[in-house]
Image: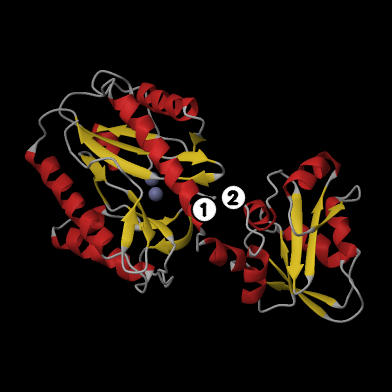
Amino acid sequence: VGSTDRPDRVVGRLEVDALLVTNLVNVRYLTGFTGSNGLCVLGPGLRRFVTDFRYLERAADEVEGFEIERAPQEFLAALGAGWDAGPLRLGFEDDALTVRQHRRIAELLPDAVELVPAGGAVEAERALKDDGELAAIAAAAALADAALSATLERGLTGRTERAVALDLEGELRARGAEPAFGSIVASGVRGASPHATPTDAVIETGVLVTIDWGARLGGYCSDCTRTFATGALPGDLRAIYDLVQHAQAEAAAAVRPGPTGAQLDAVAREIITTAGHGEHFGHGLGHGVGLEVHEAPRAGRGSDAVLAETNVVTVEPGVYVPGTGGVRIEDLVVVTATGSRSLSGLAKDLEL
Ligand code: ZN
Ligand code: ZN
């Protein structure tokens, strides 16, 4: 997925003269470069891309619209050259640069170049997906759905959480993707932990199993969660499932351009709180998904990010009752002009 007008759009957002981009995901988004060592500098009429000798060939293949520079022995030293005289405010990604790197860059740059914290500009642009990106995320989501469906055909009861997670990851890889993150398979009381890691515990009959998984395909991620029952459930768990399913449906129906992440979060949180489980919904409602599985915009308490058309966000309320179990249901949705479109195709049936 390449788009050479992305740097222009980011430059349009800048409140500085130029931006030094060191976050590799942002470098990839702007230049197309997929290697592990590179940076770029952009501003009006300014497109510098710097990498080391290992990646020159890859950069020549991948990087579009930037001057490619080979770094001297010390990677950052390349920044010292190439600045004409005259004052310049150079933004840097204060959420991506280490203190040591910042100090070194400040030493290398001419005195006329002032380093100014300017993180978030590329992330704000990344939150708006173009058609190619939307297609890539939809393809990852469809692949992930197929992988889980294949895994579920072999059943859950009697297998360990780890075996199910390995099976699922194998299905993702067999279809040409890789796991976007470590898959969560949490059964019984372990479902009360939102980010449980799979254990060697055998999945029993009559419990809830939460599976949170995603595919990374062509660089783009998907993210989805389903919770299943392995047989008849105690009434309290059944009620929690129905509650989360209702809250998830209402929050998903509220997705459209305009509300803030906090307002969207509140739709699900009010339903869950009214039912007496507010304290058991301890995480935010959702997050943006793209080149990273967690990116802008965030939807949670305190998020003033305004939802916009072409955002891709998760809607994933959960209720986690310590010592009992938990439920999370997560869909991946695209914000459209008037509402949203779900990329998560699997039904939300409690029974398999
Ligand atoms: Zn998830
Ligand atoms: Zn998620």
Query: Which one is nearer the viewer's eye here, 196 or 219?
Result: 219
Residue 101: percent from the left, percent from the top? 77, 58
Tell me if residue 235 comes above or below residue 300 in the rendering. Answer: above
Query: Which one is nearer the viewer's eye here, 68 or 351?
Result: 68
Is 156 displayed left or right of 108 in the figure? left
- At x 66% / y 79%, what residue is drawn? 15
- At x 45% / y 63%, what residue is drawn? 297
On the question of residue 293 being in view, the answer is no
Residue highlighted by disc 2: 1
Ligand 1, what quadrant? top left
| Rendering quarter of residue 85 | bottom right
Q: Earlier in the sequence, mark 2 or mark 1?
A: 2
- At x 79% / y 69%, what residue is drawn? 46
Q: Which dot marks residue 231?
A: none
Tell me if residue 235 comes above or below residue 124 in the rendering. Answer: above
| Amino acid under disc 2 | Val
| Amino acid under disc 1 | Glu
Q: Which dot marks residue 133?
A: 1
Residue occupying the far bottom of the picture: 87
| The C terminus lies in quadrant | top left
Report the Cα–Cα distance between label 2 and label 1: 7 Å
Tell me if residue 46 comes above or below residue 176 in the rendering. Answer: below
Q: Are marks 2 and 1 in contact (CB under 8 Å)?
A: yes
